[in-house]
Amino acid sequence: MLGKTAGGLYWMFRFLERSENTARLLEAGFRMALTRSSDAESEWKSVVITSGTGLGYENKYDSYSDTLVMDWLLRDTDNPSSVIAGTKSARDNARLVRTALTTEVWEAVNDNWMTLRDLLAKPVTTVDLPAALALIRKQSALVRGALHGTMLRNDIYDFARIGTFIERADNTARIIDVKYYTLLPSASAVGSSLDNVQWEMILRSVSAHRCFRWLDEQDMTATAIADFLIFDKRLPRSLAFCVKQTTENLRYLEQEYQTRHPCHDLADKLGRQLKTLDINTVFDHGLHEMITEFIRDNNALGTQIEKDFRFIG
Amino acid sequence: MPPIGCAFASDRYHDRMTKTAKNFDEMVRTDGSVTHPYAAYDAWFKSQDPARLESKAEEAEAFFRRTGITFNVYGQSEAQERLIPFDLVPRILSHREWAKLSKGIDQRVRAINAFIWDIYNRQEILRAGRVPKALIAHNEAFVPQMMGFTPPGKVYTHIVGTDIVRTGEGDFFVLEDNARTPSGVSYMLENRETMLQMFPELFSQIRVQPVSDYPKNLRRSLSACAPQACSGKPTVAVLTPGIHNSAYFEHSFLADQMGAELVEGHDLRVVDGRIAMRTTKGYRVIDVLYRRIDDDFLDPLSFNPESMLGVPGIMDVYRAGGITIANAPGAGIADDKAIYSYMPEIVEFYTGEKAILKNVETHRCAEPEALRYVLDNLAELVVKEVHGSGGYGMLVGPAASKKEIAAFRKKLEARPGNYIAQPTLSLSTVPIFVDQGLAPRHVDLRPFVLVSPQGVNITPGGLTRVALTEGSLVVNSSQGGGTKDTWVLED
């Protein structure tokens, strides 16, 4: 496979994952603003910061409001992580690697782009937001379904999956990072309804609020939530799950190409680190520090993968 | 009972036909009877519910959009990707008509390859005075780096798209010989695919020659031109300028259908005297490069030094027998519009036979007498730039306003050598589907020709382009033209 094609697949799925995550984050923020109108501005701000686009936003706007943030995250092409920008980049990459995709996957990505382009042609009002977000979710589910249902399990699939999980790990880590203070054990001592809302927001932004209730009979505590998001291998958006998936797909590539690269070592190391930790040691070591390191290592892994498989010349 | 309105389709068609022009129509004769190739289709059409056809037409458009069969239009920023309108009425040629046409194309393409070899080697045709030397020496399409070099298999034009127009029962003319990187073949294939999906019953009633072998033949034909250095099964790649190119869909389509890699310049480099592509496992050698970029961009070391699209050093590798470039650099010398006017002589010179296909009468504005005639008759002529393509920069006299003609006259007087002029041909019409009936529109035809040492292969039919506006003669997709499936009937 061409290095460029591997890179196109990787980035196609990173962008798909990113725009879906942006939509999910917006959904969580929207609920939060609805339930706590008094402090809406700072909530919208933390949504923008979590999306990793704070600088770009502040270059453009002086304040945070639902209308501005919604537009920034959904429609603004100046924001490379906006839903529309991500969808466009995903589709551009899909065109680039079209010969590596099944018709079903290509059509799903193309349809995703056409549908969202029409949906986001005009500003979305708060009244229309839930329906718009539902459609965005549905569209990305269709792409994922086409991928799982029709693609050969070979290197093409591996690069698509690796892109997905590198991006997803980054996203989950950033959510934890921005809200880490509400997850500290000291915070649960407060036990106010305020924290409950914050926790709910965190869980919602990784679509895990219902999963959490299914799996944890125990009460909602900061420790339990942090543990869930970082270590639970059943949760498809936890850090441990994402790293496990990336490592697995890298291992398939190692077998198929019969070559072990530096990225394989990096991925194994990242997995080992997570395995040796538990939530208490994380809190002892510092949640914020641990997450910052994770984000750095995960990014380094992504960069190493690009290099080892010659995405660019 | 057949639906009302449809039973009278060909009557209304005849009205529309006689109302618009006195040109040759391929379906209905002037006495109102249906021509032989269209007889079976006409019978089928009359039995159809027009509302159903209407919904089929919409279906086809949705299909093209969903699958992304689009082309990009230069100079239109956001709406870059557009659909080429597809008309659901096939353009039909009889077996006999096609036999004559393909024989003529075969002859012409062989002559073109002999001509290009001659130009870059012995230049006998120039020495014989049949083509003026100046026309070659000062020609932008002439590539001096090709002098004294014979490409693998002695093939220059691996892929040709010969543009044909028709003015009467047996009157076919070659309008252009596209010997560089002719596009449109993906539409020929997708149009047929669409027709098969929409009207499978038609194909069981009417026997149409298939076109679906084209990608396989293309691969075989390219492989047969592998360079000396190739050992084993040749690796073929398609070189595209990238996803923003107007024909990107076609590039990826052909690579996909051929099972070839789709590469860009930055994927390639010279490795040990060969051209290799960067893969996830390291560099891998390419034997045949079907390039869809112009000569000028091919190698920044040999041509345009600014080019980011090509491969530095590829010309050296090429000349050393390390790669086959299709079509060969410099092949454009044969499809230049000034050379075109010499094609009858060229065919005769190299084949020893009279040209089977006619040339359109062409006035070379570089010649003072011809220029005077053209300036006196601008309102009746079509004037084209010698190196132009895509219908840009041309004047269609009968359709132009006085102001446009005056403006064009100035351009022509300033650089007469840059133009040729031809009479406005009365292009044939064929039916298209409009508001629940048929109406005549002007068409041309681009058959696709493959050349290899094993011979010339012409896919039966080709791409029919149609001017969708009533009376219009401009069929270019960049200017509102559409396409149709083209049928050549089995004997």
Image (cartoon, coloured by chain):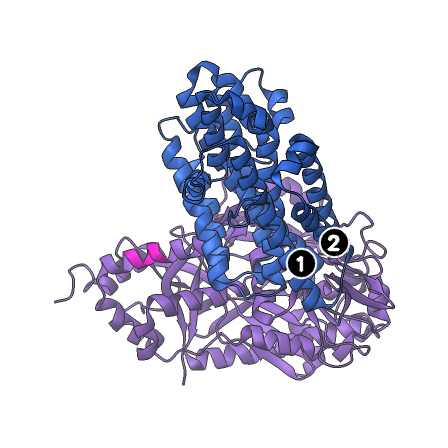
Chain colours: A blue, B purple
Few, some or many C-alpha atoms within 10 Å of disc 1 (few <14, some 14-19, many ≥20)?
many
Q: Quadrant of residue B217?
A: bottom right
Under circle 1, the secondary element is helix
Viewer-nearest residue: B372 or A36: A36
Chain of the residue under label 1? A
Task: Tell me which residue sits at (54%, 62%) in the image.
Answer: B184
| Residue A250 disc label | 1
The CA distance from mark 1 to mark 2 is 8 Å
Viewer-nearest residue: A120 or B317: A120
Q: Is residue B391 above or below residue A54?
A: below
Query: Is B228 inside the magenta-drawn segment?
Result: no
First to last magenta residue range: B55-59
Magenta stretch: dominant SS? Answer: helix
Q: Do labels 1 and 2 share a chain?
A: yes
Viewer-nearest residue: A57 or B173: A57
Residue B248 picture location, percent across and down: 59, 55
The amino acid type of the residue labelled 2 equals: Cys
Tell whether B330 sits left or right of A96.
right
